[in-house]
Image: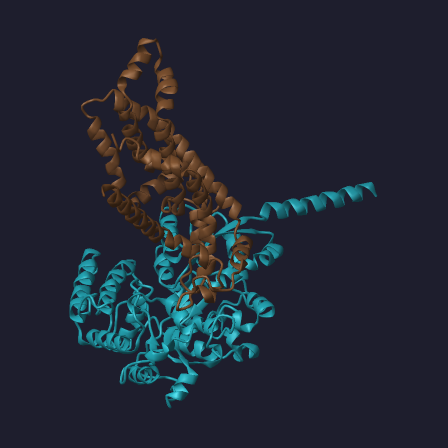
Chain colours: A brown, B cyan
Amino acid sequence: MARAVTTRRKTLTTALAWVVGLVIFFPILWTILTSFKTEAQAVANPPLFLNFDWTLENYAVVQERSNYMRFLWNSVILAGGSTILGILVAVPAAWSMAFVPSRRTKDILLWMLSTKMLPAVGVLYPIYLLFIRFGLLDSRAGLVMVLMLINLPIIVWMLYTYFREIPGEILEAARMDGATLREELLYILTPMAIPGIASTVLLNFILAWNEAFWTLNLTAVDAAPLTAFIASYSSPEGLFFAKLSAASTMAIAPILILGWFSQKQLVRGLTFGAVK
Amino acid sequence: MKLRSTFRAATALTLVSAAAVSAETITIATVNNGDMIRMQGYTDDFTEKTGHEVEWVTLEENVLRQRVTTDITTNGGQFDIMTIGMYETPIWGANDWLVPLDDLSEDYDVNDILPAMRAGLSHDDTLYAAPFYGESSMVMYRTDLMEEAGLEMPDAPTWQFIREAAAAMDDPENHVNGICLRGKAGWGEGGAFITVTGNSFGARWFDMDWNAQFDQPEWKEALTFFVNLMNDYGPEGYATNGFNENLSLFQQGKCGMWIDATVAASFVTNPEDSEVADSVGFALAPNSEGVEKRSNWLWAWALAIPAGTQKEDAAKEFIEWATSKDYIEMVAENEGWANVPPGARTSLYETPEYQEVPFADITLDSINAADPTDPTVDPVPYVGIQFVAIPEFAGIATQVSQEFSAVYAGQQSIDEALETAQAITNEAMEAAGYQ
């Protein structure tokens, strides 16, 4: 009897998970479908789901008008660069907070997180002026720094949570065996925290990839990533939804593929330590 | 002989080097409108003629505004040319943020620019941006439905006639709305439309002492008329409809009338996109009976040079190329006269081939009927028809239009919205030191 209830509950939970998943995925699916329609079909009312003449014309137009590869390359550099830099800074910071905490550690963590609550536009002018001063406008180096800094609180928090799950005694034992700090970090802590670090890397990469305030405001030509590519297809006077959808599909495709292949790692990392 | 060859070679080398030195790469920030995209396609022609290369930064309209405002106020120098509108130009010109375009070449023929456009893009009689295309607003209507309804659209209708026609054409069973108008929040969307509607009912944003006027009966009359008209004969959810949404509805035959930008005429009459392309008529934007001012606006997307640029000469060359008579002819030759950028030059409307375009005359009449220096029945201290050319307006009008959109969505009453609009506006104007 108990078994039957469990099966029914499982079926219901699975069905519910599918419904929620489909609802969340539907806008992306709709964008992909719209990218294969003509502009007239894209705004047809009632909307056309699958029964339309599929066309690749929008992709051809987008490809002809924009240098997609340049935007893609910039996105890879910005997301990758800021993630690597962020991890390099955050691992030692999270280590010290997790294993050598002070009285102020909790306050510092909260303070770091509070910077995420500041609306970005509030510091646009100071950052812009700094970028002018140091010649960083429209440069990948400048943007890597900014993206790293805005995501740093999240990286530190995530790593801190993962590190806290690792027993301090193991590190102590390593120290007793004569491991230096560098060896302790590199050969003991990092291998044990790999799942956590991997999911932090993935999440930070996705956050940096999708960031659309600083990447639009601090770039023009040379450092503009895929967010700028999408923005260039939004129009106040004219119906270009199909082309906008094609550009959006091209922009999200790489991150969707990355997410698909690394979903196990992501889920494992995000639920790490959730169940004891 | 040898000396002569050497001399020739040296001369050739010098010329090539000189060309290479003077050739620049200019960066242009622009919006993703049809005419702008078309211009990007012709960039090679400019490069061929001048040697200058062009880099385009295309952004969404509001992002573009924020982006270029940040750059220009901090002297960032990211852009050599920016696409700006009639709202920003006089304000930025007054602040010396733009390079004056007072030394354009004789061939360019600056006097050929339509007077209304030239006035709207100038400050103290100095031109600060060259219009790439200009627009007013007008009535676009279905001639077949109008005929079925037994009505005839006057050249210059009143709002009262528009309501009568909307009632006659409204056909919910066949999914045809009598009329489609903008209700979407935003100073340039629904905010612009309700402002010109207010003008045509005798309302105004401010009196001569910069006091808000939303507590006056003219505003209540205008807003009540608009809300009743749209609730009775407009599409469902019109509170979120802007230009693009209404364009889509009209092109699919779901609107009997649509009052909006004259630039839409080429979209709704294009058989490739519009199901009703062969049955569209045009008329001047309406006014309320007994009110002299009509509800047509004036707008231009124009090219301006920020004061911080290091490439002023190359930028001017581009502006002269892009807004010239030759450019218009080049587009006409390749893509037909209906696709040339409208509303900028007088000579375009004197071209016999262009006069055959069905919406040419009405566009010119609408533009000529708009006077940004005298937009309302009662005098006002500001310039601008669908906007008030002060820096604070965009913020205030966005908030006010949000209040009005809440009325369209049935979330609050007209009186509540007007009361809040009055308070928001007066508070902002007082804080800004106008009162």
Residue located 47% across and 64% down the image? A51
Query: Is A250 or A46 nearer to us in this picture?
Result: A46
Give residue B92's position: percent from left, percent from top.
Answer: 36, 57
Judge whether A91 appears above or below B416 on screen.
Answer: above
Query: Is B108 or A254 nearer to us in this picture?
Result: A254
Seen from this angle, which residue lies furthest front?
A1
User: Does residue B33 appear in this view?
Assistant: yes
Tell me the quarter of the image containing the N terminus of chain B: top right
Residue located 67% across and 44% down the image? B14
Give residue B37's position: percent from left, percent from top.
Answer: 50, 60
Judge whether A136 appears above or below B430 on screen.
Answer: above
User: Does residue B101 appear in this view?
Assistant: no
Tell me the quarter of the image containing the C terminus of chain B: bottom left
Instruction: Identify the image quadrant of residue A156.
Output: top left
Give residue A204's position: percent from left, percent from top.
Answer: 37, 37
Query: Is B160 or B78 nearer to us in this picture?
Result: B160
Give residue B376's position: percent from left, percent from top.
Answer: 28, 74
Q: Is residue A253 left or right of residue A129?
A: right
